[in-house]
Image (cartoon, rainbow, N blue to C red):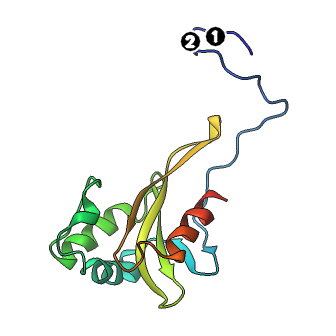
Amino acid sequence: MPAATPQTPLPIGAALPGWQAPPAPQITALEGRYCRLEALHAAQHAAALYAANAPDTSGHSWTYMAYGPFAQLAEYQRWVEQWAHSADPLFFAIIERSSMRATGVASYLRITPASGSIEVGHIHYSPLLARTRAATEAMYLLMQ
């Protein structure tokens, strides 16, 4: 294992020969058997997402989020408009194939092509999406 350097005080693995930084991700539709992920758009998705979250009257699904719950559709729509065109985080609406409605969101974030690093976050499943095959598949599609 290579020795530590001033920039990396802990030992790191060997450099990969011929490694090149990947391009930044583009927001293209990700197709699965149970769900489809597409670019988040306020006009297309905000109302359906707000309605899908309505059964969570306690707001528990928002506990670990830095935003929400949203008391009014207009408030949620403003939040979607704020983030829909962001490059980092890069938001997707999760569309369940069984209903063809948006029932959750997720994003890529901390996108650092120079180090080949990307994270998945801002994951919010409505009660309609939580604990379903579509929810599991959404994470699989993002990680492919």
Q: Secondary structure at mark 2?
A: loop
- Residue at the spot 58% in from the left edge and 70% down from the top edge: 137
| Left or right: 119, with 72 as reference point | right
Q: Residue at x 64, y 81 (%)?
A: 33
Question: Is disc 1 placed on a helix, strand or loop?
Answer: loop
Residue 104 sits in quarter: bottom left
Mark closest to the chain's N terminus, 2 or 1: 1
> Is label 2 in contact with label 1 (beta carbons under 8 Å)?
yes
Residue that label 1 marks: 4
Q: Is the residue 120 above or below the residue 124 in the image? A: above
Q: In the image, 119: left or right of 20?
A: left
Above or below, 25 against 2 in this view is below
Q: Which one is in front, 18 or 11?
A: 11
Quadrant of the image containing the N terminus: top right
Q: Position of residue 100 (x, y in %)?
A: 49, 89
Residue at position x 43%, y 80% in the image: 102
CA gap, disc 2 and disc 1: 5 Å
Residue type for callout 1: Ala
Q: Position of residue 140 (x, y in %)?
A: 61, 63
Q: Quadrant of the C terminus?
A: bottom right
Q: Residues within 10 Å of mark 2 (few under 14, many from 20)?
A: few
Q: Nearer the viewer, residue 1 or 51?
A: 1
Q: Amino acid at mark 2?
A: Pro
Q: Is residue 63 above or below residue 111?
A: below
Per the image, the residue denoted by label 2 is: 9
Task: State the residue lying farthest toward the bottom.
Answer: 99
> In which image quadrant can residue 2 be found?
top right
Q: Nearer the viewer, residue 59 or 105?
A: 59
**Where 78 sits versus 36, above or below?**
above
Q: How far across and down, in percent of the image, does residue 65 sit?
A: 29, 55
The structure residue drawn at horizontal position 42% and vertical position 76%, both measured from the top left corner, is 129
Q: Which mark is residue 42?
A: none
